[in-house]
Amino acid sequence: MTESHPRTGAKPASHPLRPVIFLVIVFGVWLAIVASRNLWIGKELVPWQSDLAAAQTEAHSSNKPVLLYFTASWCGPCQEMRRSVWTDKQVAAAASKFVPVKIDIDQNEKLASQYRVESVPLLLVLDDAGQPVRALAHGVDAAEMEAWLTSANLSSARP
């Protein structure tokens, strides 16, 4: 039962674009949320490379181990680490003792297969021959990552 106007008795007219306006408002709110979320994510402070061969050459000349990080855009823990771990100054300082390489397993399936990546995130510290000497096969917070990188660097120190 629709109500009528108290003085005229006329029924209120429904605006024909009302559903469209509603959808535009909902879409606008959603877009604002997504945009603000992306603005609040800090910049990754770890200077990731994407070319493992070039990183191994640099590692050899700089006498640093390679830190190989396998990730994926659909990986929830990887995205959380992107927001809260790789933006941390202490983590970046600890990672500076390595030549860091980030590999998206969907974009480089051959390398992921070569290193037998079964799940992500996966971090490997590589020796001079490109063989893993240390692995971390799950997401961690910034403090855990800093501790792991510090101990990994000590245990993989080169003569």
Image: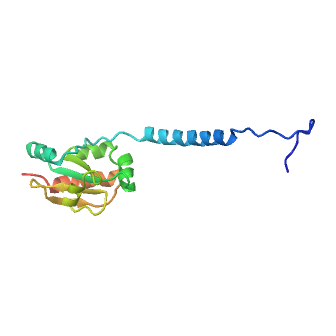
Residue 76 place in picture, x, y as percent: 40, 55
- The residue drawn where x is 22% and y is 52% is 68
Q: Classify 27 as above or below 155.
A: above
- The answer to which of 53 and 143 lies nearer the viewer is 53
- The residue drawn where x is 54% and y is 43% is 30
Residue 21 place in picture, x, y as percent: 65, 38
Residue 103 place in picture, x, y as percent: 25, 50
- The residue drawn where x is 41% and y is 41% is 41
- The answer to which of 114 and 95 lies nearer the viewer is 114
Q: Quadrant of residue 49?
A: top left
Q: How many marks?
A: 0
Instruction: Please say which color scheme the image uses.
Output: rainbow
Q: Quadrant of residue 47?
A: top left
Q: Classify 127 as above or below 9.
A: below
Outermost residue, top side = 8
| 100 left or right, relative to 121 | left
Outermost residue, left side = 159
Q: Quadrant of residue 25?
A: top right
| 146 left or right, relative to 38 | left
- The residue drawn where x is 19% and y is 55% is 125
Q: Classify 70 as above or below 13.
A: below
- The answer to which of 80 and 18 lies nearer the viewer is 18
| 1 left or right, relative to 57 | right
- The answer to which of 133 and 11 lies nearer the viewer is 11
Residue 143 place in picture, x, y as percent: 33, 52
